[in-house]
Image: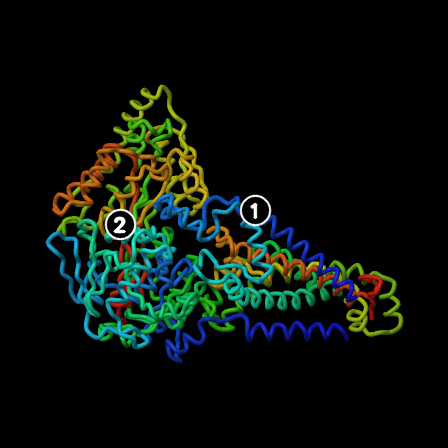
């Protein structure tokens, strides 16, 4: 009968699929990585494996193409720069054992450690830094991060534009162990840049031998960090194994790390409860129930969400209107009650904890320059309306993700409560919102910026271009402060420039109104210790972690 | 039959070309570029131009279209923007497996349970099992699969610890998502089968068969089921396409690296080459399944002839 033939066909097809096509990613690796005995509960994470997750795919392992946190996390743990962030988020010697800086602060000479090796046994030399840094400064770099080198390194920008030759660029291997960098201007945070994945070394011979396959799979890469990649699948995650040829291997305590991809918050929580994850990030709604747990902790990042006003828009071109809108939002309630996920209320553009003068943070030095004051808000609003002739109608542009929409709705309520005005919310996809801003087609928008590196300049530099995205802000005072900070050799004066520039931008000109610093509330299994999360750059650090 | 299939394949290609063309031009109307807008806007105009040039995004859309079609005919679907450097064909192929497996299992579960329930419900019309089937059918259709998925995950995965909570590690990982997806299929098939069977059981030839003295099982299987199954085959086409091409919600809940989430993500990130690749895959697959369903008709019901040369049993 034909029906039985059909059935046989379906069965055959399903068997083919089951055996070949479906690519279960975990089987081979988890068996190899975590041993045969996997039991329930916390036991699963105590067999020498830490399992964490990301909410998005790991886009790429090619460091000159990587620009997202998920890729950075993996890269930072399988590779290493001259320096690495320690548990307190400060740079400490990594592949370099020391550095010297010239008196004019323009030449950095790094000395590499003895006996450094790539995971394939090749010696790691200063030439590997020259190759990768030049790569990052060339048009090959598709991560749009070239500026992080070309802004500082002599002839970097010219090399990018193909107007300078490689040998004219300020990166040199003086010998196998000595790497020299020449800077255009004094950059007190230069060491803190060398911890970023863009600054990691690459072996020219190996990269070239792999061609277009480089970084596509775990076996198409070599490693020099605390871990090596055992498997890499953008969609289902990565498994990491301790790198025995790492110079500091003796201090890497956890032998295996899994990084999975989980997009659904509820799934992550269930996986954590069933012992499949070592740490889970909580959503605002889960925080109240979990807050008293011993596994609970929270932290805030160097990422500021703020209101960007478009100065060429008639309604918000009035400074009093902008000041009124800024004073009208109660940020403490926003962070502590509405978001309640570890986020901190913004008191300025530069996030809590960012580098200041070495003893105090930038935020502590500049004080609270963004405040909530309903009476002042009302006063400025009335002044502004008088100047404009009539009350403007306002539209707030936001992204359509749930957190940003929550924030926008809260702000809308605050404007209603404290100013008595109705503001419309225009919620768009991320791409559409950014396009509207680039096209100068918005009034004010909820937008955010995360620090690329630990210095106020990573924020303050953004408003010097006068682009529509940054509200068409063009101020000579502001630009000269930033220009001066960039060439200042005196660190104290430079800091003063930056402190003043934040005040100019936020409180005097009210171009932006900071709202909150993004935070994370999470649970960590009691047997996991010292799983460090950095507030910027590569987020999760496995090197210092240990298991009880 | 052979001539008929050839003709259908030609139509398939023409339809595909129309779909690809429409999608390509609509896709170019999406706001933004495939690059991170905040960083991209920091580049100077010259750098931006250089970047777009590198990916051929500076050309007029019609030129880009010409180049793309040319490459597709040569079997080159380009490389993904989002997964920098990964060939699109590889990205898609890697994601089809998981979606297809859970889809196929869901269909097998849904089909077998649905058919059995439908047949019994019709046979024992207005009995307890009939009402039970109808309740199952209403529940199956009205409870969205992601609710079923979340409930199964919580109880079977977490509370009872019988099957994995999530992830794609072994065949066990595919069981819960398959069951979650199968509810809708079960419900739909059961309802269709019951309705058709009730109709068929009223027919004269059933009375004839019974009058011949055939036993109840043979009457049901050989005469009633065979004649009731055609509408089920019709709806099976779209169901197969739907399930085998992935479900965003269920894949996300179980953290399965399937193709459903890839499609949505590629649109969100303006990953042009991946959007096109998946569009081609989806539409080719859909048209193909519709064709197979048409051919299946003739296998099941000799009265339906495909073309002049078609032959039944």
Expressed as whole percent of the image width and height from the top left, the position of residue B145 reads 55, 58
Q: Residue furthest bottom?
A: A36
Disc 2 is attached to a residue of which chain?
A: A
Quadrant for the N terminus of chain A in the image: bottom right
| Residue depicted at 21% across the width and 39% down the height | A501
Q: Are marks 2 and 1 in contact (CB under 8 Å)?
A: no
| Residue depicted at 38% across the width and 79% down the height | A35
The answer, for residue A356, to whether it is visible in the render is yes
Spatial distance from mark 2 to mark 1, Cα to Cα? 37 Å
The image quadrant that residue B310 belongs to is bottom right
Disc 1 is attached to a residue of which chain?
A: B
Residue B255 vs A323, above or below: the answer is: below
Is B200 positioned to the left or the right of A236 in the image? right
Which residue is nearer to you in this view: A54 or A192?
A192
Is B261 positioned to the left or the right of B209 in the image? left
Expressed as whole percent of the image width and height from the top left, the position of residue A162 reads 34, 52
Which residue is nearer to you in this view: A244 or A203?
A203
SS class, disc 2: loop
Which numbered dot is residue A53? none
SS class, disc 1: helix
Which numbered dot is residue A151? 2
Expressed as whole percent of the image width and height from the top left, the position of residue A167 reads 26, 59
Q: Badge 2: few (under 14), some or many (20 or more) residues near its Cα, within 10 Å? A: some
Is A476 positioned to the left or the right of B120 in the image? left
Expressed as whole percent of the image width and height from the top left, the position of residue A457 reads 23, 46
Query: Disc 1 marks which residue?
Result: B62
Is A42 positioned to the left or the right of A187 in the image? right
Quadrant for the C terminus of chain A in the image: bottom left
The image quadrant that residue A441 belongs to is top left
């Amino acid at each position: 009968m034909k029906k039985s033939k059909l059935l046989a066909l379906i069965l055959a097809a399903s068997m083919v699929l089951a055996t070949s096509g479906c690519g279960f990613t975990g089987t081979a690796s988890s068996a190899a990585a975590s041993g045969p005995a996997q039991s329930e509960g916390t036991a699963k994470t105590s067999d020498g494996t830490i399992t964490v997750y990301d909410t998005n795919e790991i886009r790429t392992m090619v460091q000159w193409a990587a620009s997202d946190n998920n890729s950075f996390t993996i890269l930072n743990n399988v590779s290493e720069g001259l320096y690495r962030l320690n548990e307190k988020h400060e740079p400490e010697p990594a592949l370099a054992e020391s550095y010297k800086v010239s008196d004019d602060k323009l030449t950095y000479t790094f000395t590499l450690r003895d006996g450094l090796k790539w995971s394939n046994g090749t010696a790691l030399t200063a030439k590997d830094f020259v190759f990768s840094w030049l790569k990052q400064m060339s048009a090959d770099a598709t991560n749009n991060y070239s500026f992080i080198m070309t802004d500082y390194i002599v002839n970097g920008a010219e090399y990018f534009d193909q107007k300078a030759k490689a040998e004219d660029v300020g990166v040199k291997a003086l010998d196998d162990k000595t790497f020299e960098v020449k800077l255009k201007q004094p950059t007190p945070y230069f060491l803190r840049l060398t911890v970023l994945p863009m600054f990691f070394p690459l072996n020219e011979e190996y990269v070239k031998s792999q061609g277009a396959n480089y970084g596509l799979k775990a076996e198409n890469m070599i490693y020099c960090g605390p871990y090596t990649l055992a498997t890499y699948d953008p969609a289902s995650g990565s498994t990491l194994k301790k790198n025995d040829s790492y110079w500091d291997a003796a201090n890497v305590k956890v032998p295996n790390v899994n990084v999975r991809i989980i997009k659904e918050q509820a799934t992550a929580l269930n996986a954590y409860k069933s012992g499949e994850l070592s740490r889970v990030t909580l959503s605002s709604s889960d925080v109240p129930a979990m807050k008293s747990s011993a596994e609970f902790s929270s932290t805030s990042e160097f990422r500021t969400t703020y209101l960007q006003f478009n100065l060429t828009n008639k309604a918000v071109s009035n400074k009093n209107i902008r000041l009124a809108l800024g004073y009208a939002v109660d940020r403490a309630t926003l962070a502590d009650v509405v978001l309640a996920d570890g986020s901190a209320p913004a008191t300025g553009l530069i996030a809590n904890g960012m580098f200041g003068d070495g003893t105090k943070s930038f935020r502590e030095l500049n004080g609270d320059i963004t405040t909530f004051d309903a009476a002042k808000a009302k006063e400025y609003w009335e002044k502004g309306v008088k100047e404009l002739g009539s009350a403007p109608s306002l539209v707030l542009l936001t992204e359509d993700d749930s957190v940003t929409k929550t924030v926008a709705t809260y702000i809308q309520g605050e404007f209603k409560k404290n100013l008595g005005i109705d503001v419309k919310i225009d919620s768009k996809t991320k791409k559409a919102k950014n396009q509207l801003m680039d096209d100068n087609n918005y009034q004010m928008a909820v937008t955010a910026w995360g620090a690329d590196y630990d210095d106020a300049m990573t924020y303050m530099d953004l408003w010097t271009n006068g682009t529509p995205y940054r509200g068409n802000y063009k101020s000579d005072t502001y630009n000269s402060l930033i220009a001066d900070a960039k060439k200042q050799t005196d660190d104290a004066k430079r800091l003063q420039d930056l402190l003043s520039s934040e005040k100019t931008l936020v409180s005097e000109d009210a171009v932006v109104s900071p709202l909150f610093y993004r935070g994370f509330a999470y649970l960590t299994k009691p047997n996991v210790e010292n799983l460090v999360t950095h507030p910027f750059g590569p987020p999760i650090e496995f090197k210092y972690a240990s298991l009880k | 039959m052979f001539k008929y299939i050839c003709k259908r394949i030609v139509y398939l290609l023409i339809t595909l070309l129309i779909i690809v063309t429409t999608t390509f031009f609509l896709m170019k109307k999406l706001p933004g570029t495939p690059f991170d807008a905040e960083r991209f806007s920091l580049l100077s105009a010259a750098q931006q131009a250089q970047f777009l040039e590198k990916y051929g995004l500076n050309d007029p859309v019609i030129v880009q279209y010409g180049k793309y079609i040319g490459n597709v005919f040569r079997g080159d679907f380009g490389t993904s923007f989002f997964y920098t450097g990964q060939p699109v064909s590889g990205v898609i192929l890697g994601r089809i497996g998981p979606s297809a497996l859970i889809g196929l299992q869901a269909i097998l579960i849904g089909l077998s349970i649905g058919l059995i329930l439908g047949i019994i419900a019709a046979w024992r019309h207005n009995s307890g099992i009939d009402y039970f089937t109808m309740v199952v059918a209403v529940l199956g259709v009205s409870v969205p699969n992601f609710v079923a998925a979340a409930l199964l995950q919580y109880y079977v995965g977490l509370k009872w610890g019988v099957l994995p909570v999530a992830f794609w590690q072994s065949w066990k990982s595919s069981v819960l998502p398959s069951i979650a997806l199968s509810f809708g299929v079960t419900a739909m098939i059961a309802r269709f089968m019951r309705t058709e069977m009730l109709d068929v059981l009223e027919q004269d030839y059933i009375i004839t068969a019974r009058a011949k003295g055939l036993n109840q099982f043979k009457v049901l299987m050989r005469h009633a089921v065979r004649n009731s199954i055609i509408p089920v085959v019709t709806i099976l086409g779209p169901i197969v396409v739907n399930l085998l091409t992935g479900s965003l919600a269920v894949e996300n809940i179980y953290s399965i690296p399937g193709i459903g989430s890839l499609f949505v993500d590629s649109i969100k990130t303006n990953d042009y080459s991946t959007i096109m690749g998946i569009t081609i895959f989806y539409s080719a697959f859909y048209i193909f399944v519709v064709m197979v369903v048409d051919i299946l008709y003739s296998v099941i019901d000799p009265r339906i002839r495909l073309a002049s040369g078609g032959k039944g049993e």
